[in-house]
Amino acid sequence: MNTKTESPVVGIIISLFTDTGPQVVLNSAETHVSEDQAFNLSIRIMTLIGEGISEDIFGPLPIPSNEEFLCLAYAFFVKSTFTTDPRLKKRPSVICIVFKRQLKRIVSHAHGLIFSYLSNVTPELFRTEDDFKTVKMREIDTRLTALISTNPIRIYRVSRDTLVEHIDPIMIPSDAYVVADLEKKTLFVLYDQHLSPVQKRNVSIMIDGLNGKEYRRGFNKRIVDSEEEKEQLLNFFGLAKNL
């Protein structure tokens, strides 16, 4: 399997709505998106989302005065630590993922992965407006750039009859793992050796649903039966101790 880490993501822009309006607190895409463009983008997104802001992803959206790049915007709230406006006890916040326009299709494939990662990590890293520290924001930037590669390998795990994206660095035992190779357009299925035929059938149905929802039924499904190949794949993806 190919493991290239080249990414279409060129950086992120993080904005926070303050008493005086949107404020850009990080622009790691500054070599491609100017400070003025980043500020105007923040205003547009805050206006577009308005009071209906929630933990969701919007886009792809255009970047003002920039034809080369697009962005996805993840919106969420943090608690304010000081405000003169009682309506702003919760601060609307946005993480914009800036990517190359011509690689829109690749980023669209990773939409679910982006949402899974940000919806899990933002409540932990950013609870109040004081939590927007450079080191934390740079961590988000680095992780997103690594997650969305031009040939991403996505891993799903099946546990308790539920299929979820596997993004936690701490590996969790599962009934099965599904490795999605976007280059080969193949879903590699690795079953626990103790899984019954009925359980395998249920897992197969979930995988067919994943194929339809995430990949428009464009992927082949391959069951890895060879114990040798299975062991190689488990070791390669760091899952050997968990299945």
Image: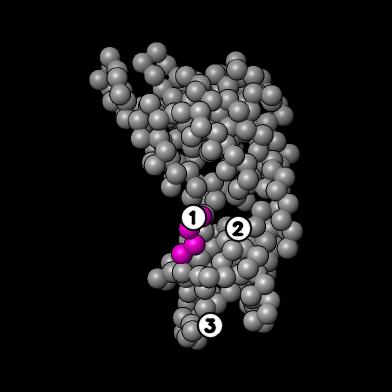
For this view, does 60 lie left or right of residue 79?
Answer: right
SS for dot 2: strand
- Whole-angstrom CA distance, mark 3 to mark 1, is 23 Å
Image quadrant where one finds the N terminus = bottom right
The residue tagged 2 is: 154
Residue 84 part of the magenta-drawn span: no
The residue tagged 1 is: 168
Q: Position of residue 191 (x, y in %)?
A: 55, 77
Residue at 70%, 36% (x, y): give it: 100
Residue 171 part of the magenta-drawn span: yes
Q: Which residues are magenta?
A: 168-172
For this view, does 139 lie left or right of residue 217?
Answer: left
Residue at 67%, 34% (x, y): give it: 10
Seen from the viewer's position, the closer of residues 182 and 147 is: 147
Relative to 73, say whether 149 is above or below.
below
Q: Position of residue 141 (x, y in %)?
A: 57, 36
Residue type pointed to by label 2: Arg
The residue tagged 3 is: 193
Q: Earlier in the sequence, mark 2 or mark 3?
A: 2
Residue type pointed to by label 1: Asp
SS for dot 3: loop
Seen from the viewer's position, the closer of residues 137 and 45 is: 137
Relative to 86, say whether 68 is above or below.
below
SS for dot 1: loop
For this view, does 124 lie left or right of residue 112?
Answer: left
Q: Quadrant of residue 67?
A: top right
